[in-house]
Structures are given as structure tokens and as C-alpha cells.
Amino acid sequence: MDFRELSFDPAPSITTPPPGPRSREYLAFQAASEAAAVSYPRGLPCALARGRGATVEDVDGNVYIDFFGGAGVMAVGHANPEVVAAAQAQLKLLTHALDLPTPPRRALVERLRAVLPPALTRVFFGGPTGSDAVESAVKLARLNTGRSPLIAFEGSYHGMTSGALSLSSGRSFKNRLLPLVPEVHFVPYAYCYRCAFGLPRETCDLQCAKHLDHVLDDPHSGIGTPAAVIVEPIQGEGGSIVPPPEFLPKVREICDRHQVPLIADEIQAGFCRTGKMFAIEHTGTVPDIMTMSKALGGLGLPISAIAYRENLNTWGPGAHIGTFRGNQIAYAAGAAALRFMREQDLAGHAARLGDCMVAMLREVERESPFVGEVRGKGLMLGVEFVADRATKQPAPDLAARVRSLCFERGVLIEIGGHYSNVARFLPPLVLTEELARKGVEIFAESVRRLEA
Ligand SMILES: Cc1ncc(COP(=O)(O)O)c(C=O)c1O
């Protein structure tokens, strides 16, 4: 398929400086009537009307290249025609059935089983969000081990429900006096640009993984034997952090040695985004439990799932329930999206295009005194901004400025990272090379304007 047909053409096309008058009206209504917790419109102030492929149009008729992709949800592109057709067909047939078997539910499970590691034999649908999947993964691990403590990694993001929030490392979420789940401990991730041990990658001997081994091994580490270790194979919100290839296998080996189940959170990195169906495949690591959501719903329809090993399938009927145990339209869309991903080799496309974008971004890294590091895999990319390359002092203000400059010129990007100083790219995987090049050129010009 020629992916050019999927997106708006021309893109970007800014005809009214954004936010245009209609967007401003929507933004004012939202600010006056919705919660102060609403956040994305602060960085990307526009109201959206339509999306196609890797582009979106606002209510004033401006067309943007979407390097944000609904936080990684829109893998097969906005309004993907094949997926829309599948969802529309299901809409007329059946939309809700709790966890009774149905044809679209079965189709999605069959397609998932075809792409999941064969050792993950069981699929479970719980509540609709990624956070729900994390909660059910943790519950399953706890039920099976009879233990309560959990280990997560610095830089992690696993969601906003109480348990998932407790596993997320961001201090801004913790400082809000909410009761968090006790006995959650954080160990350093392989964030080599800012190594927690101050070691260079060439000689570190994976000190971060060794530290995990240490806390599990030493009876006086202060940490009870955990019910699970939860890891993002590539960290998303933490700043698109790709660990060295040996990191995940080492974590797996350590978990095995200490008989601790390993949960891989593929909610953001999964479904072709990093150049493989799942990011764990880059290193051949198979977890005990895997969480999935975001791209699973095809069109951004809310659905999440976990897949896990047969030996963990010990919970009884009703051990984890909810009104929305999957959703028939999302099953149909998800099954169609999985077929599209495989037929169109979206993983291969993401890998090729990601290499092309990284090569262009490395030019920016070479030229700009404010770019500390360009990193990523496939179409999960990050550019870390610093005030000074020698001290690596984080520059969140520069990242925010670049986001605004890109927005004004028709490119949507997001910001994440430990210090909110990483420009993040999570475009729909049906992005074309032409749109990728245009978008990165606009990003590069925006970075150059920082110096001016
Ligand atoms: C790795 C990861 N896990 C879990 C979540 C939470 O998903 P949700 O926002 O759907 O609850 C996210 C969301 O960004 C995520 O990136």
C-alpha cells in the first residue's frame, strides 16, 4: 500500500496562525468548563477536527504532521480505512458482551496469539486503559507468589490508577499526598546518558542490572522478596530511553535466579513501534506477564490486555472483574489493526523510517549546543535538551520552546523525560518518508532558532 494515500496532502499546511479563532473559542470553553487537570492543550493549543494517517487537521483548517500520534496510540494511522470498516461493521452487530465469547473477541485473541511469544499462552482483558492492564498484571503476580513488594525502575511510567501510579517514578505524581501502594521500590534503569552510578557505558559492566541483583540477593537490602519486577523494555515517558541490548536479558536472568516474575510493560513500545511487533523481541527476552494497550484498539478505542505464562493461570472465576472487559468494537478494530500491521510490515517500515529520522536528528545533535542526546528505536525517538553539553544541565524550557515553534509551523511533538527536557516523537507508523523528512526539517529549524 502507498501510505501517501492515507494522510492529508499537503501537510503541513498552516493557513491561520495557530491557535486560530475557532480553536481559541474551543480552548476558552474548555478552560472555563473542564478540569484544571486537562494538560495537552497547554503545550499544543488547538482543537482538532479530523485525522488522517500521520496528519491531523484543526478546527481552523490547519493541517499538522502528527509526530505525537495520540501518545503512541495511533500506530496504524488516524482513520485507517481498513480498521474503520471493521469497527463500523461491528458497531451494527454487537457492542457489549462482558466476557462472553464473541467472534471479534476470538479473532483478536487468535491474532494476538499469533504474534505473542509462544510461552505467553493466556490472554486476559480487563478494564480499558493501560493502567488497568498494569493493575491486573500486578494482581496476578501477587496472587501467584503470595508476596506483596514490587520493584520498578527509575524513569518508569505505568499509569495513573493507584497501583500503576505507585509503580511510576515521577516525583510530581508522588508529591500530591495521595495514598500510594506500599512496598514499591525503584532501582536504576539503564539510562546511560545520565548513569545513576556515574559510569561510562563502555566500562560499566551493567552496574544498574547488578544493583537489582544486589537488592534481591542481600538479605539486608531492606526490600522484601518481590511479587514482581516490572520493566518497560524501552522507556517511554521517561524520555524514550533505549537500554543496551544486554540489559533486559540480564534482568530476566536475575529474576529467574531469584524466582521473581518479570512483567514487561509493552503498552507504549509494543505493536511495531520500535521496529518489532514487541520491543522485547529486540533481545529475545520473554517475560512472565506482558501488558498491552494503546495501539491495541486500532483507532484509539480503549482496550487493554495482559498475556501471561500458563503456570500463572491459577486465579479463579471473577478474580478480576469489571463492566468493560474488553469492548466488541475495539476487538474488531484491534484484530483489523493487527492484520494491517502484519500485511503492511509496519514493523519493518518503522525500523527503516526510524533510522532515517535518527540520521537526520544526529545532524541536529552535531550542530546544536543544546542537544545532549538523540536516541530511540524505530519510531519511538527522543531528543534530550540541555543548557550545556558538558554539564548536561537539563533544559526543559528549551524543549517547551521547540515544541511551540514546531507547533506554529505545523508539527506536533510531545515532551517527556526525567526533567521534562526530552522532545518525544511517536508518530503513526504509516508516516511516509516525505512527511518524516519535512517534520524533522521543521524540528531542526526550530532548534536552530533557539540559538538565535
Ligand atoms: C509504558 C506505559 N504503561 C502504562 C501506561 C498507562 O496507560 P493509560 O494511560 O492508558 O492508563 C502508559 C501511558 O502512557 C505507558 O506509556
Image: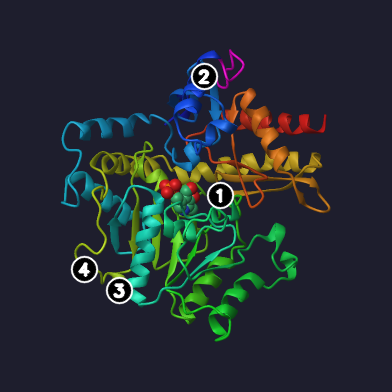
Residue 374 screen position, x and y as percent: 69, 47
Whether residue 428 is visible: no
Render colour scheme: rainbow
Magenta residues span: 8-20
Mark 3 or 1, nearer chain start = 1
Residue type of the residue flagged with mark 1: Glu
- Queried on whether the Cβ of the residue with tag 1 lies below 8 angstroms from ligand 1, the answer reads yes
Residue 419 magenta-highlighted: no
Could you say whether the residue bearing mark 1 is in a helix, strand or loop? loop
Separation of residues labelled 1 and 2 (CA atoms): 27 Å
Under tag 2, what secondary structure? helix
Q: Which mark is residue 237?
A: 1
The residues bearing labels 3 and 4 have C-alpha atoms spaced at a distance of 13 Å
Tag 3 or tag 2, which sits nearer the N-term?
2
Which residue matches tag 2? 23
Q: Amino acid at mark 3?
A: Asn
Q: Which residue is mark 3?
A: 311
Residues at discs 1 and 2 in contact (Cβ within 8 Å): no
Where does the N terminus fall, quadrant-wise?
Answer: top left
- Which residue is drawn at the image coordinates 43% and 57% (left, top)? 162
> In the image, is the residue at mark 2 within 8 Å of ligand 1 by its beta carbon?
no
Seen at 38% across and 38% down, the residue is 300
| Spot occupied by residue 58 in the image (x, y as percentages of width and height) | 49, 21
